[in-house]
Image: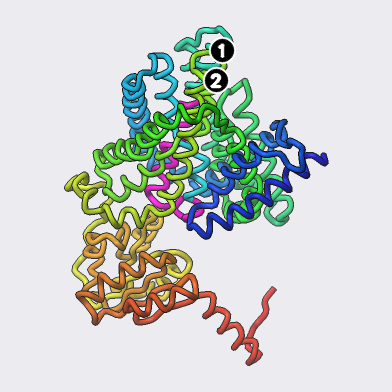
């Protein structure tokens, strides 16, 4: 007990220090967690080696995985999953096929023998669902179209990875894995998914509603459900993974009205355990034979960082998605997975892979985790610089176009329909013909269309979306977007050709105000500051009405 307490203390002291460093360098904090594992795995503390028994940390890591994917399932309704299911399936399988074939050929070219090349190809094929979910959550992009497509094909990857591990475990036990075994596993997966859909629509929302009067009971029931389903799905009887189990547990509760309340109660607990997961991942990265492995590791890392996104870019533009959606989705496969490390070390234990190759794939993991995290967190900025080249990949007719709006003049455009945007639209509920809403979440767009609003789907920083919303003829543009860069692009694009258009933008941080005003914004709103001023006036004039 004392040892695990000391280990947790070391972990959180190191992650806090390294997180400050990453924040200074404007790098994702997820890298701080992985580097903490690398650091504490290579040093002793006060002359004593800790972290030699990883069983306790592995158990805590599995809790973090379960909670992370559970929340993902809670935030993704069954209907939303269905809307991107076909695209995710085609993209997921296509990416697996092309990446594995190209990776196998590249390994052969570098002189690896056939069996070892097969292991390398498998390791390069899979991407980390857990890492991507964490990064997209930090960016608030889980509900965007590219976020949903990415999560969809990453879950397809996870399922194929489980089949690959099943085959390799069969080889490790000296058994042959037949086609019948694979068909049985596919049937089990389909049955589990069907049961989850039934429960999510017929039974669980009623149960959750009946216990929602007690937040403590709602919290404990949600945890019991998450861990219970994850344990059941990952048992020998079903044979899927904890990741898929946690996701399905959340998906089953997603239709409950109280799902957002559950998310808010569990998110902090998830963050605690997910730190331990990434530290444990760093601990598992063994860096032997570095000098001999560095060359091939850089070569394969470049393939994963550049080749994998290009494969997804071609697949999604081939399915008639916009270049930006395809590019953003492609960046999510620019790293290898924890499955990759499991596969390669299993191959080493079987004598199919040398120690040097295992070390090489470990280096690929470190390089791609670090660089792809930076790429994903700064994807909008990267796209801004290369979007002219990516437009060549885009088809003339795309899947994402909203119906053309009728010609509008002197209208109001609201960009970003979050809580503030929704409140603005309510004020125009009797004047819907005078307003245009713009949002990048397809579910929000569909809901607003059903309510009778003029809606444009897409990213407002793209010229075709600006044109479709007819921004140049607008009377007022209101942007609730929290991102400074997006608001600056919007202001500069409009004021350059249409200085008479009034632009009101949101400043999530106080320091953004000066930059936005200098760029040409007519008004900058700081929501929290306004709320504070209003409350203080109400209190000062004794006008605040307290309700139970």
Please state which of residues 320 and 331 is positioned toward the viewer in this rendering: 331
**Location of residue 540 in the rendering, given as x and y in whole percent from the top left corner:** 64, 90
Query: What element does badge 1 sit on?
Result: helix
For this orientation, the residue located farthest to the right is: 2
Q: Residues within 10 Å of mark 2 (few under 14, many from 20)?
A: some
Q: Is residue 267 visible to us here?
A: yes
**Location of residue 265 in the rendering, given as x and y in whole percent from the top left corner:** 65, 54
Please state which of residues 129 and 73 is positioned toward the viewer in this rendering: 129
Q: Which residue is at 19% across, 75% downward?
A: 497
Q: Which residue is mark 2?
A: 346
Q: Earlier in the sequence, mark 1 or mark 2?
A: 1
Please state which of residues 472 and 198 is positioned toward the viewer in this rendering: 472
Q: Which residue is at 48% across, 35% downward?
A: 365
Say whether residue 147 is magenta.
yes
Are the two marked residues, 1 and 2, in contact with CB atoms closer than 8 angstroms? yes
Q: Quadrant of the C terminus?
A: bottom right
Q: Which residue is at 56% across, 7% downward?
A: 174
For this orientation, the residue located farthest to the left is: 396
Q: Relative to 546, does residue 405 appear above or below in the rendering?
A: above
Q: Is residue 187 visible to us here?
A: no
Q: Relative to 350, does residue 318 appear above or below in the rendering?
A: below
Q: Quadrant of the N terminus?
A: top right
Query: What element does badge 2 sit on?
Result: helix
Q: Which residue is mark 1?
A: 172
Say whether residue 131 is magenta.
no
């Amino acid at each position: 007990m004392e040892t695990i307490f000391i280990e947790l203390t070391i972990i959180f002291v190191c992650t806090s220090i390294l997180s400050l460093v990453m924040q200074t360098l404007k790098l994702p904090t997820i890298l701080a967690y992985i580097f903490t594992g690398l650091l504490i795995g290579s040093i002793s503390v006060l002359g004593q080696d800790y972290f030699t028994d990883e069983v306790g940390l592995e158990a805590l890591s599995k809790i973090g995985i379960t909670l992370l994917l559970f929340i993902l399932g809670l935030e993704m309704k069954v209907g939303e999953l269905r809307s991107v299911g076909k695209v995710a399936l085609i993209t997921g399988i296509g990416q697996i096929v092309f990446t594995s074939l190209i990776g196998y050929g590249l390994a052969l070219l570098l002189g690896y023998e056939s069996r070892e090349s097969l292991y390398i190809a498998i390791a390069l094929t899979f991407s980390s669902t857990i890492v991507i979910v964490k990064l997209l959550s930090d960016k608030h992009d889980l509900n965007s179209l590219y976020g949903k497509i990415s999560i969809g094909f990453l879950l397809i990857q996870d399922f194929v990875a489980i089949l690959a591990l099943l085959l390799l475990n069969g080889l490790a036990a000296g058994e042959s894995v037949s086609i019948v075994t694979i068909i049985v596993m596919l049937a089990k997966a389909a049955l589990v998914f069907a049961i989850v859909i039934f429960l999510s629509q017929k039974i669980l929302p009623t149960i959750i509603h009946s216990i929602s009067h007690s937040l403590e009971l709602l919290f404990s029931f949600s945890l019991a459900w998450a861990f219970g389903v994850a344990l059941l799905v990952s048992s020998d009887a079903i044979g899927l993974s904890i990741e898929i189990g946690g996701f399905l547990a959340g998906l089953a509760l997603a239709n409950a009205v109280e799902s957002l309340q559950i998310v808010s109660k569990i998110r902090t607990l998830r963050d605690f355990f997910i730190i331990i997961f990434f530290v444990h991942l760093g601990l598992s990265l063994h860096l032997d034979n570095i000098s001999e492995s560095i060359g091939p590791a850089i070569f394969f890392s470049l393939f994963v960082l550049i080749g994998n996104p290009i494969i997804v870019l071609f697949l999604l533009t081939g399915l008639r998605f916009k270049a930006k959606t395809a590019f953003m989705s492609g960046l999510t496969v620019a790293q290898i997975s924890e499955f990759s490390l499991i596969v390669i070390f299993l191959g080493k234990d079987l004598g199919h892979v040398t120690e040097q190759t295992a070390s090489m794939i470990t280096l690929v993991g470190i390089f791609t985790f670090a660089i792809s995290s930076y790429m994903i967190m700064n994807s909008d900025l990267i796209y801004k610089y290369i979007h002219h080249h990516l437009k060549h990949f885009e088809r003339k007719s795309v899947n994402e176009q909203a119906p053309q709006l009728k010609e509008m003049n002197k209208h109001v455009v609201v960009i970003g329909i979050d809580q503030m945007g929704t409140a603005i639209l309510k004020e125009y509920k009797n004047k819907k013909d005078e307003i245009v809403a713009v949002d990048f979440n397809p579910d929000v767009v569909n809901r607003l269309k059903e309510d009778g609003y003029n809606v444009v789907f897409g990213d407002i920083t793209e010229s075709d979306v600006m044109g479709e919303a007819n921004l140049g003829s607008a009377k007022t543009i209101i942007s609730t977007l929290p991102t400074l860069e997006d608001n600056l692009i919007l202001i500069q694009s409009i004021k350059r050709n249409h200085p008479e258009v009034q632009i009101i933008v949101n400043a999530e941080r106080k320091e953004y105000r000066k930059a936005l005003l200098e760029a040409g914004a007519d008004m900058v709103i700081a929501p929290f500051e306004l709320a504070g001023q209003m409350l203080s006036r109400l209190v000062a004039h004794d006008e605040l009405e307290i309700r139970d």
